[in-house]
Amino acid sequence: MVFIRGGKFLMGTGEGFPYEAPAHEVTVESFWMDAHEVTAAEFAQFITATGYVTEAEKFGWSGVFDLETREWKRVDGATWQHPHGPHSTANNDEPVMQVSYNDALAYAHWAKKRLPTEAEWEYAARGGLAGKTYDWGDELNPDGKPAANWWQGSFPARNTGEDGYIGLAPVGRFAPNGFGLYDMAGNVWEWCADWFDEKYYSKNSGINPTGPPNGEERVMRGGSWMCSENYCRGYRVAARSHATPDTALNNLGFRCVRVSQ
Ligand SMILES: [Ca+2]
């Protein structure tokens, strides 16, 4: 885990989607954060230790974006072990996917950690840079090269894989941000603890905000290998997304935090 020294920062932006505004001052306390997304190997340890059954396994199906047909599908037998469908196998060093918010909470509890608040997540993702579009700066392709695993080309028709990955990447293949955190942009979306409310930024107190008291969907941050310039641009550091707590997909994972190492 990486120590994130608390501080004050400008959360959100007025330059993205309306629910990313207004940019507002937020203070967070110090915490430790997983340097990379929870991997399939780490999740397997949790399953072995506890016998936990994920929601996708209980439902018998999950959401899969099919790279062949370029569309989202409901796929029977898609689980954390078979993230793209029953004929696929999770690689140990890839982020675990097909885990719901509830599954992520169960893992965090077992690991004696918790999910980051949305404010902690964005503070950590900014890596000490202020007011930048990406966690590495303002240029989409610094030095002419993609700095994270996202979708180059027009989603969903064309995927050039200029970053080296048509689909998912193992964790830690791109340079870390200023705090030493890997893949805060792209690869897989990451669950945050908060309920999602698109108007929350104009309501929160600015001191260790923990999100709205209730809601229907949870926050996801960071974007994924499916995010492109013509679509959600979810790899921007202020980008927000959301899903119901039982949602599991093959571009959605998580990482954990805790107050002390
Ligand atoms: Ca890619």
Image (tube, rainbow, N blue to C red):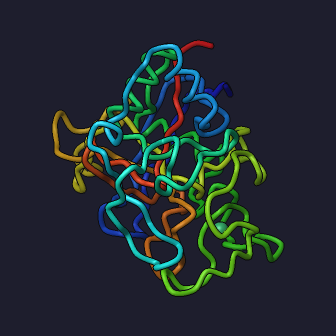
The image quadrant of residue 7 is top right
Q: Ligand 1 lies in which image quarter? A: bottom right
Query: Which quadrant, please, contains the N terminus?
Result: top right
Residue situated in front as seen by the camera: 109 or 139: 109
From this view, report whether residue 260 is shown above or below residue 42. Answer: above
Q: Which residue shows up at 74% across the image and 76% down it? A: 162
Picture coordinates of residue 72, whole percent (x, y): 37, 69
From this view, report whether residue 41 is shown above or below residue 140. Answer: above
Residue at the far front: name it. 87
Q: Which residue shows up at 47% across the image and 70% down it? A: 66
Residue situated in front as seen by the camera: 150 or 102: 102
From this view, report whether residue 110 is shown above or below residue 136. Answer: above
Query: Which quadrant, please, contains the C terminus?
Result: top right
Tally the marks: 0
The image quadrant of residue 17 is bottom left
Picture coordinates of residue 186, whole percent (x, y): 58, 58
Picture coordinates of residue 138, whole percent (x, y): 65, 68
Residue situated in front as seen by the camera: 170 or 13: 170
Q: Which residue shows up at 42% across the image and 17% down it? A: 109
Q: Answer with left or right where residue 60 lies relative to residue 86.
A: left
Q: Which residue shows up at 34% across the image and 46% down it? A: 219
Picture coordinates of residue 86, whole percent (x, y): 47, 52
From this view, report whether residue 198 is shown above or below residue 38. Answer: below
